[in-house]
Image (spheres, grey):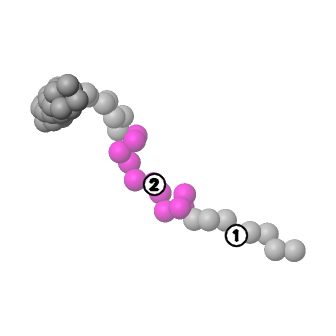
């Protein structure tokens, strides 16, 4: 009885493991999303906006 229980438990673990392995290799559904970008987002910053103002030293 003890050996039969271990064999059944081993087969159950094997079946669950194989099912999870097959499920893990299934490809995901491909989703394409479009994101509108305004032309102002594509502009480069001006050089003056990149300057860091000097810290006031007292």
Q: Secondary structure at mark 1?
A: loop
Q: Work out whether residue 30 can be spotted.
A: no
Question: Of the residues under marks 2 and 1, which one precedes in the sequence?
Answer: 2
Q: Over which residues does the magenta segment extend?
A: 40-50
Residue 50 falls left or right of residue 57: left
Q: Position of residue 23 (x, y in %)?
A: 16, 29
Assess disc 1: are there few (<14), some (14-19) or many (≥20) residues with their C-alpha within 10 Å of its C-alpha: few
Magenta region's main secondary structure?
A: helix
32 up-or-down from 48: above or below: above
Residue bearing the label numbered 2 = 45
Crowding around mark 2 (Cα neighbors within 10 Å: few <14, some 14 to 19, many 20+) is few
Residue 39, position as x, y percentages in the image: 35, 38
Please name the residue that numbered disc 1 is placed on: 54
Of helix, strand and loop, which one carries label 2?
loop
Left or right of 55 in this view: 43: left
Residue at the spot x=33%, y=34% of the render? Answer: 37
**Place of residue 36 in the rendered image (x, y in percent of width and height, measured from the top left):** 31, 30
Indicate yes or no whether the magenta region holds residue 43.
Answer: yes
- Disc 2 to disc 1, how far (Cα)? 20 Å
Which of the 4 image quadrants contains residue 29? top left
- Asked if residue 1 shows in the view, the reply is yes
- In depth, the one of 2 and 49 nearer the eye is 2
Question: In the rendered image, which quarter contains the N terminus?
Answer: top left
Residue depicted at x 70% and y 70%:
54
Q: Which residue is pictured at 30% across the width and 30% down the height?
A: 35
In which image quadrant can residue 56 be found? bottom right
């Amino acid at each position: 009885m003890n050996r039969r229980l271990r064999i059944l438990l081993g087969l159950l673990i094997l079946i669950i493991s194989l099912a999870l392995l097959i499920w893990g290799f299934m490809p995901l559904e491909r989703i394409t999303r479009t994101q509108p970008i305004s032309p102002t987002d594509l502009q480069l910053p001006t050089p003056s906006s990149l300057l860091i103002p000097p810290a006031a030293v007292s």
